Image: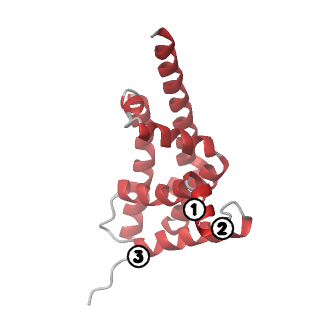
Amino acid sequence: LRKLGVNILLNRAVLEKAYSEIRSLDSHEGIEDADPPEAIPRIIELTFDYDEMHPFFVSLVSVENVHQGRNIARLPSIKKRNASVIRVLTSILERGAKQGIFRSDVNAIDLHLLISAFCIFRVANRFTFGSTFDTDLSDPAIRNRHKKMHVEAVLRYLEPRRKN
């Protein structure tokens, strides 16, 4: 029982460190103050590259989801730390909407989910997806194509809707 307690504490410490590393991206090189159409691609690219270079982080998140987020729920510091990405995205979205280049009805949490989903999926499912579709997601050409595709897809999603 004591060993289980030590493992739980160790797992929580690893979660804290992993989330603290990825959240350091939010303040990376003045992203929050960059022009919105430049800030969003930078956030996507940083997230994409981080996940690609840190498959352990993606595995850690996947395992935590298997355990229904029990450990992360007991770590209020992670919730507090992750509030920064929502604050940054909210600021960028608001400025973009005021400039008329982004829709005004986009929720920052939804946008964060959209950005994270594709980036994490590529890493978490690289072997099964690769085997199923006979493609190597680690191939530099495919990786670069996917990064550009994701940036374009998100930017198009953020475009103001045309009124008919």
Residue 89, horizontal then vertical, whole percent: 43, 55
In the rendered image of this protein, does residue 76 appear above or below residue 149?
above
The numbered mark, 1 or 3, whose residue comes first in the sequence reads 1
Residue 98, horizontal then vertical, whole percent: 36, 69
- Please tell me whether mark 2 sits on a helix, a strand or a loop: loop
* Quarter-of-image position of residue 34: bottom right
Amino acid carrying label 3: it is: Glu
Read off the residue under disc 3: 159
- Please tell me whether mark 3 sits on a helix, a strand or a loop: loop
Residue at (60, 69) in percent of width and height:
133
Amino acid carrying label 1: it is: Phe
Residue 120, horizontal then vertical, whole percent: 53, 53
Spatial separation of the CA atoms under disc 2 and disc 3 = 31 Å
- Please tell me whether mark 1 sits on a helix, a strand or a loop: helix
Answer with left or right where residue 95 lies relative to residue 35: left
Few, some or many C-alpha atoms within 10 Å of disc 2 (few <14, some 14-19, many ≥20)?
Answer: some
Spatial separation of the CA atoms under disc 2 and disc 1 = 8 Å
> In this rendering, which labeled residue sits more in front, label 1 or label 3?
1
**Residue occupying the far left of the picture:** 164
Few, some or many C-alpha atoms within 10 Å of disc 3 (few <14, some 14-19, many ≥20)?
Answer: some
Read off the residue under disc 2: 135
